[in-house]
Image: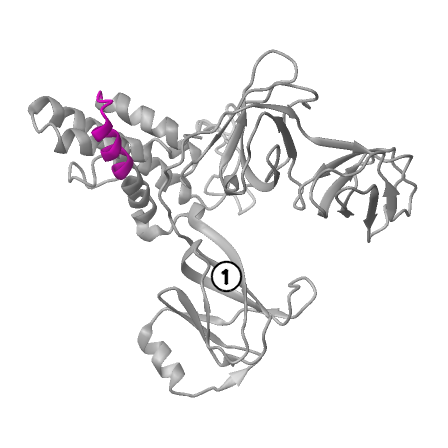
Amino acid sequence: MITWTNALEMYTSLTKNTSASNLVFGAQTLNDSIRTVCSINGGKWPFLEVEETVQTVADQAFVTLPNNIRKVMSFRYTQGLDPNKDATYTPRMLFDSEAWERILSARLGTSNYPLFGYQKDRQLWFTPIPSTSGNLISLRGRRHITDLSIADYTAGTITSVPFVRAFTGVVASGATSATLTAAFTLPTGVYSVRFSSGQSRLVLLTNGATTATWSAPVTVAATSAITVETILGGSILTGTGTTFTRDMIGRWIRITQLSDANTGDGAWYKISDFYNSTTIGISTPYQGTEISVGTAAYRIGQCSVIPEAYQMAPIYRAAALYWNINNPNKLSLSLANQYWRLYDGGVEVALTSEYGGLIGQMMQESGESMEGPYISPLPRKGDADFGIPFYSPWNNASGL
């Protein structure tokens, strides 16, 4: 991942200008370039899809969209708050204003079953108007892009990951509760607990207490050792000398990889949970070797939503704009064109009509419909001596 601090460093390196005024210009053009990349192809990038939930208000014809959603693509309506148990269906999303006006003219009134939805600015409107409060609406839409501005954070060290604890004894098959060997130190709440048997359960843990309870009985006996994870199963990291904050949720963390014991795996993980100034959760399980009583260096950074392989694209575009605008001479024009080609092949400035560079690669990847193994070409000389192509004209659909 390229953090905001890294992006500014790369920009100043490509422009060969470390002045304060250029940093301001670079910050503006980098954020503009991220939005530009996200707007290519009508903004229909898979990485921009996001889902959020809101609740209905009785006799109110609309709900306000969460700030994370720019445009609603579709939505699901649940008669209640549990989509796994309550009836859920998909009303029709309208994108044509004239069609919406015709639907409104039918005066469908109020109902617990809205049939249509239409987005107006930052609101999603319904007809019929919901007659019940508290029903769940799951919105699927395009992500709203916000400016990056926060410098990397590296204070202190990571001392442990994952969050390992223990019960006072073995966990018998059929158990729905156990006792911790020491009082729980994180905020009271539901956590995903992984037992030594490999089974996981959602467990209620109480700050300052040793009680642990869960609903679904374990079906396999386990030892006293457990791993406490975020409610969605991500790992929990503990640091020392840190001042983690809630607004770090959504940023990325990398624990530095070294050959020494108790160091990280060098991979980036998205921060999903905040517990206190020394403890945070990541969205996926930590894949490196367990860190215990460590002093591992780390970096927390703000990163763009663009996939990691293509995060240089807005930096190339910002550098191209710099050489185009600030130094309009032959040398700088040559440099500008070089960066335009690295960015999108030169489409934006009419150097070519076909996408290339990183944007071309990203468009090619997003256009793939499926993943599959690489199959090397086979010779066509004959099926007796050299084999036959994987698909020959006489093959049926299975390739046989």
Circle 1: residue type: Leu
Question: In screen coordinates, is 186 left or right of 377?
Answer: right
Q: Give the residue at mark 1.
A: 139
Name the spot of residue 382 as percent of width and height, x first: 47, 28
Q: Residues within 10 Å of mark 1 (few under 14, many from 20)?
A: many
Residue 159 is inside the magenta segment = no
Residue 26 is inside the magenta segment = yes
Evaluate whether residue 222 shows in this view: yes
Question: What secondary structure predominates along the stretch shown in magenta?
Answer: helix
Name the spot of residue 24 as percent of width and height, x first: 25, 34
Name the spot of residue 362 as percent of width and height, x first: 37, 38
Q: Mark 1 falls on what kind of element? A: strand
Residue 341, placed above or below residue 92: above
Q: Nearer the viewer, residue 329 or 374?
A: 329
Name the spot of residue 350 as percent of width and height, x first: 15, 40
Residue 113, picture quadrant: bottom right
- The residue at the point 19 percent across, 34 percent down is 321
Residue 160, picture quadrant: top right
